[in-house]
Image (cartoon, coloured by chain):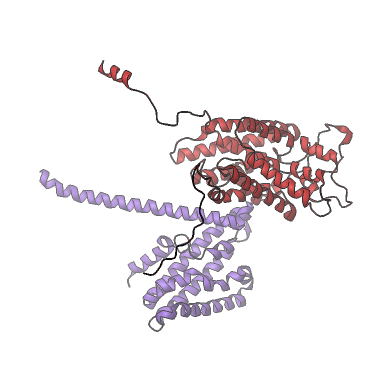
Chain colours: A purple, B red
Amino acid sequence: MNAKDILLQFKNGLFDRNPLLVQVLGVCASLAITTTVSNSLYMGLAVTAVLVCSNLLISLLRRFIPEQVRIAAYIVIISGFVTIVEMVMNAYMPSAAAKLGIFLPLIVVNCIILGRAEAFASKNTPLPSIIDGFAMGAGFTIALLLLGAIREILGSGSFFGIQLFGQSYTPIGILTSPPGAFMTLGCLIALIQYLKDRLQSKTKASADQTHKDVKNKEVEPNDL
Amino acid sequence: MNEERKENTLLQVSSAPHIRSHDSTQTVMLDVIIALLPLLLWGCYIFGMRALTVTLITVFSSVIFELLFNLITKKTITVLDLSAVVTGLLLSYNLPHTIPFWMPVLGAFFAIVPVKMLLGGLGKNLVNPALAGRACLLLSFSSAMTVPPVLTRLDLFESYLPGDALSGSTPLYTVLSPAEDGSSISTELLFDMFIGNESGTIGEVSALLILLGFLYLLLRKVVSWHIPLSYLGTVAFITLLFPAEGVERFDVVYMLAHLFSGGLLLAAVFMATDYVTSPITPKGRIIFGIGCGLLTVIVRYCAGNEGASYAVLTMNLLVYFIDKITVPRPFGAALPKLKIKKESKPQ
């Protein structure tokens, strides 16, 4: 467990395997609550908190949970943490909890959390699992914030509830409704695929370049 | 010398088909534009020059967006097939003349880029681009898309203008929410609707001119009668037999008012008949028309709003399935047999 591994995990969570924009997990809640940036932030933080805690516990218990009932066991653990998060939010930030509504308890069935439990925490030691939880949670939160920012700025003309434009601005209502959410998500996914392609071709080109250089060096002596 | 002889002796026979139609996308679209132009003239006459400006902005931005998309993606330039012009015209016909000028640009962008070009251009789009553009604008800017009452209603036929009976709503709303005193729609109002002396979007007002355009397209064999007639027939049938509450059955005036008001005729003649987004076979076309009619009336009755555009959009998405179940039997082919699973005997 060195710094390079941690960096790679964060790069995976934020970009290469971003839960929302690349793996396209947890779409339902994401589309529903990203009408404003503040909603996105609360949702992202709640999911991250649950993800880190459940990853840790599942990783600790990975040798004790029988293979056959693992999904049920994971769900019980996850729902425990979701209940805690829900109670905390209800106690200390009731307005945010009210805004998230049903989607707060629904974090239990969010595929990202179960997906990370199954794919990562059940196979790794606690420390990498916690880091994975933070990385994936951060990736999800940033994706939600992007979605929320685009939808709130264009759809309601505000950012974090602060009106950005004057009276003359006509908000594009479709962006605050479900079709607008789908379109924005589609555009973001397309953008990230484009960036990935660019990056890949660049690394490939540089790899080819070095390959050529090596070849040239090999050829040179023969020519001489 | 040698080459010349070769050229002379070579028999120049192309492969079948040998009979060719002179129709191309361009000529078909040109015919549609010709059929659409009188509506624009009437729109300018009744709403003023702002209608023309809105239309020009929509058409130009449609064409420019398609051209830009072609250039950016480095594909063949497809602007000359005129389909973008038709999309722009139809989109603007669905807009009120009072709309702020930048909204049609946004609508044209939505119609051309995501709905048409991103799916592969003309022939690949799933839904009618103009209608999708209109739906996008309607969902986004519902207040700017509401049709204002025409303040300068023409005194074409002074004798029976119903005064300001219409101020505040388009005839469609008069039809959909009958007067509380139980009086039905006057024949004068119906005549106004037919001529187009009413409020509405730029291109939908004149039933007469739309029907003339339909006639032209029929004579030029650009469209077949199946979709418009089955569509309008379904609407007529339902509104005649099952009118809204408070209206007597078999009220022909009520039925005609349903047909002439709102965007129904425009949608039935010009949008539902779009080659790309309508079924191929006559049988499929009739199913498509009936579906459009049913959905239109359902939206009109239940939501109290114009449902033609949403009806056509919904049916557009079903075209693939309609085409699948209406594949014609090849001449001489056997009737399709019921598939019976043969029980495999254990040996």
Q: Farthest residue toward the top?
A: B1
Along the line of sight, which residue is nearer the eye, B60 or A143? B60
Q: Residue at x 50, y 73 (%)?
A: A49
Query: Could you say where residue B175 lies in the image, as x and y percent from the top left?
Result: 79, 47
Drawn side of residue B29 relative to residue A17, left or right = right
Q: Farthest residue toward the bottom?
A: A64
Along the line of sight, which residue is nearer the eye, A164 or A116? A116
Along the line of sight, which residue is nearer the eye, B37 or A98? B37
The answer to which image quadrant residue A136 occupies is bottom left
Q: Residue at x 48, y 28 (%)?
A: B19
Drawn side of residue B25 relative to residue B192, left or right = left
Quadrant of the frame with the C terminus of chain B:
bottom left
Q: Residue at x 70, y 30 (%)?
A: B41
Query: Could you say where residue B313 lies in the image, as x and y percent from the top left?
Result: 61, 48
Considering only vertical position in the picture, is A20 above or below A216?
below
The answer to which image quadrant residue A175 occupies is bottom right
Q: Residue at x 39, y 64 (%)?
A: A12
Drawn side of residue A39 relative to residue B151, left or right = left
Residue B94 appears in the figure: no
Residue A36 appears in the figure: yes
